[in-house]
Amino acid sequence: MKGMLTGPVTILNWSFPRADVSKEVQCKQLALALRDEVCDLAKAGIFAIQVDEPAIREGLPLRQVDWDAYLPWAVDSFKLSTAG
């Protein structure tokens, strides 16, 4: 059996994020919640756990000069969600 989850960046980009909290903070909060799910799946004996991030590019700024403000926290959030 395989577990499949939507990643934190995709959840954030396909949701209605709060305006009073940075997207970086919200994404890391989502990543922590997903990490709990990943750990629960692993404890249940699921060894193949897939975390999809189809919308990671949707949040990517159009200007490449602005990518450094987005990619570090987006990638870190994905890594955090799968580190358990």
Image: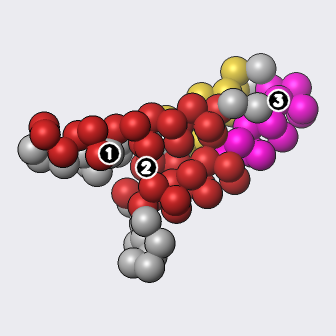
Q: Residue 17 in the image: state x and y as whole percent.
A: 43, 70
Of circles 1 and 2, the one toward us is: 1
Q: Residue 8 in the image: state x and y as whole percent.
A: 52, 48
SS of the residue under disc 1: loop
**Whether residue 60 is situated above or below residue 14 in the rendered picture:** above
Q: Tell me where the magenta segment starts and ends, as one range.
A: 34-46
Q: For the point 75% across and 25% down, which residue is it? A: 1
Badge 2 amino acid: Thr
**Within 10 Å of the Cα at label 3, are there few (<14), some (14-19), or many (20+) other Cα atoms?**
some
SS of the residue under disc 2: helix
Can residue 66 be seen here? The reply is: yes
Q: Which residue carries the number 3 mark? A: 42
Q: Which residue carries the number 2 mark? A: 10
Foreground: 41 or 67? 67
Would residue 23 be found to the left or right of residue 60 on screen?
right
Q: Residue 54 in the image: state x and y as whole percent.
A: 37, 39
SS of the residue under disc 3: helix
Which image quarter: residue 14? bottom left
Q: Which residue carries the number 1 mark? A: 70
Q: Residue 25 in the image: state x and y as whole percent.
A: 52, 59
Question: Gap in Å between the C-alphas at discs 1 and 2?
Answer: 13 Å
